[in-house]
Image (tube, rainbow, N blue to C red):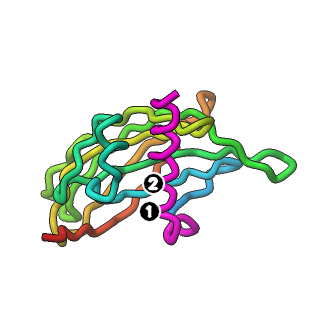
Amino acid sequence: MRRGLLSGLLAAGLLLLTAPLAAQQYEQVGRYQIHYSAVNTSFLPEEVAREHGIQRSQVMALLNVSVLEEGEDGTTRAIPVSVNGTVGGLSRGDERTPLSFRTLRGGDAPSQVAVFRIHEDEPMRFDLEVRHDRNADPARVSFIQRFYIDR
């Protein structure tokens, strides 16, 4: 019961942290909405981070990816997906770091999360492949985000 509560808190916390950006941080692929957000792990509540084995640090961030399937009646439902991806700088010569995703469940809403090191005050490019439908090619999602370390 406690694990379910903490998972729900993590999902709710991630939604609250990214709520101002949520309307802009998704891509529509057919009838699927691929939502993504990246936040510094120091924003996570200590208990939630500890329960899920997430290191809270000023130099670490968490990428959260979830997918909603749109029904014919306009409703949406969260679906389980698999995600592969990399993060790195913007220059061609910049090293790409593979992201290691794992599933977190907050109630009925599964999310794929990966933790990575921040490059302070440098734009970071994320390239993701989201397998949202086993009968289709993975959707490719790319975005750029800059992180700042509060010292």
Which secondary structure, mark 1? helix
Percent position (x, y) of residue 10? 45, 46
Left or right placement of residue 10 versus residue 137 in this view: left
Q: Which mark is residue 14?
A: 2
Crowding near the residue tagged with mark 2, few <14, some 14–19, many ≥20 C-alpha atoms within 10 Å: some
CB contact under 8 Å: marks 2 and 1: yes
Left or right placement of residue 139 versus residue 143 in this view: right
- Residue numbers of the magenta segment: 1-24
Residue shown at 84% from the left, 47% from the top: 72
In the image, residue 78 sits, relative to residue 89, either above or below, namely above
Residue 149 in which image quadrant = bottom left
Q: Main secondary structure of the magenta part?
A: helix
The kind of residue on which mark 1 rests is: Leu
Residue shown at 59% from the left, 28% from the top: 134
Closest to the observer, 131 or 4: 4
Percent position (x, y) of residue 3? 46, 30
Closest to the observer, 111 or 8: 8
Q: Which mark is residue 17?
A: 1
